[in-house]
Structure formats: structure tokens, C-alpha cells
Amino acid sequence: MRMSVLLRLLALIFMLITSWALVHSYISFSWKTIRMPRWLGSVSKKSRVVRNKCDIGKPCPNNFFAFKILSGAANVVGPSVCFEDHMIMSPVKDNVGRGLNIALVNGSTGTVLRHGFFDMYSGDPTLLVTFLKEITKEMLVLVASYDDPGTKMTDELRGLFSNLGSSYAKQLGFRDSWVFLGAKDIRSNSPFEQFIKNNPNTNKYEGWPEMLQLEGCVPRKLF
């Protein structure tokens, strides 16, 4: 009789232990399955894609301005001028034209001062002479060619552009491609300039050389 009671007691203890183990295992599993993933409600550790100003290849350091200048493509696609993430001139804005597209920017604050395009095929070159003579030392000058920048180019204009730091203004001619950033009375030639001569043997487009792209970081002018 005593043996039977003992066996029943042991069986009851075994059942209690087994039940406790099953319940504990189920609760633990349930908590694991409903636990919120770590990424939910928190910032992902994966690095985000950082867009640089004017979509240039790398960010500019402090006290530098980002810029990108694209020349026109043949006489089909107009040029564009971007400065500090501000698209100053572009075909989308419908403020570009045949010849030379020029923007003037305050070299200390980055403020856009003036912009315009000058027809260098059939326009009046004296309008560009007047525009360039009004440039002061605190300004940066951004230039992009489109279609033909050179037919109406005079010696006076070549001298004015050279005084802004251009190395190629003296040889700029019919349907050449040219992009440039300069400033008045700089001590040496500007490092921000690209030029391709119109050459039937090397032109990318029929009658025109390829489009040029110039981008970089220009130091802020401190006065």
C-alpha cells in the first residue's frame, strides 16, 4: 500500500516537473518569436548614400564651394552651371543659349550676382565686353560654351578672359568646347579649365567636339 502511494507521488512529481519544463520552454519561445527586430524603430547601421552638392564626386572641405560646369553638346543639348548646389543655368531652366553662358558669383558668400548668355556667332561682342569689364575682384566667373563660342571672339575679349585666368581664350575658335572658372587679376592661370579644339578628325559629334564637364571645389575668397 505504501509502495503504491509512493509510486503515485513520484509520478505526480514527474508530471509537475515535465509540465513546468514545457511551459517554460513555450514562454521562452513565444517571447523570442514576438520580440521586435532591432532595426525596427532604430537607425540602420548601414551607411547611407550621401549626395554631394552639385552631384560632384566628393564633398568639399570647409571654406570651399562646390561647382560643376557642363558645356553644351553640339547644338542640341545646352550647357549647365551649378554652384553650391544651386543650378544657376541649364536647359531645364530655359536660360541658356548659343555662344558663351556666364554666371557671376560672390566669391566670399557664394551668392549668385548675374548670369546671361552671349551669342558669339551672330551677336554683338561689345555686349560681352561690357559684361566682363564690370567684373570685380570679389567675383568668381563660371563659363560654359554652347554650339559656337568663337566666331565673334575679338582680341579685346581674349585679353579680358586671360585676365580672369584663362589659358585657352587666346585660341578659342569656331565650335570649340570650353568650360572655365576664374577670377579677376589672379596671379596665375586658373586650374579650373578644359578645352577641346574643333577638329573634323577627332570630333565626337558631326561638326562639334565632345561635351566637357568640369567639377571641383574652389576656395572661398576671404577679404
Image (tube, rainbow, N blue to C red):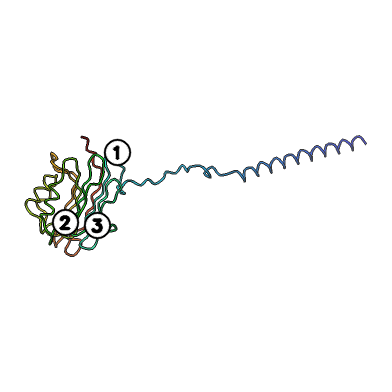
Label 1 is placed on what type of residue? Pro
Q: Which residue is mark 2?
A: 118
Residue sitting at the far right: 1
Residue 95, numbered circle: 3
Report if the CB atoms under discs 2 and 3 are less than 8 Å apart: no
- Specify which label sits upstream in the sequence, 2 or 1: 1
Q: Position of residue 67 (x, y in %)?
A: 26, 47
Residue 8, numbered circle: none
Q: Position of residue 36 (x, y in %)?
A: 58, 44
The answer to whether 84 appears left or right of 140 in the picture is right
Q: Position of residue 206 (x, y in %)?
A: 18, 65
The answer to whether 52 appears left or right of 100 in the picture is right
Q: Quadrant of residue 154?
A: bottom left
Find numbered disc 3 in the image and state the secondary structure of the residue it sits on: loop
Q: Quadrant of the N terminus?
A: top right
Residue name at image x 37 percent, y 45 percent: 50
* Mark 3–mark 1 distance (CA, rounded to whole Å): 30 Å
Find numbered disc 2 in the image and state the secondary structure of the residue it sits on: strand
* Mark 2–mark 3 distance (CA, rounded to whole Å): 11 Å
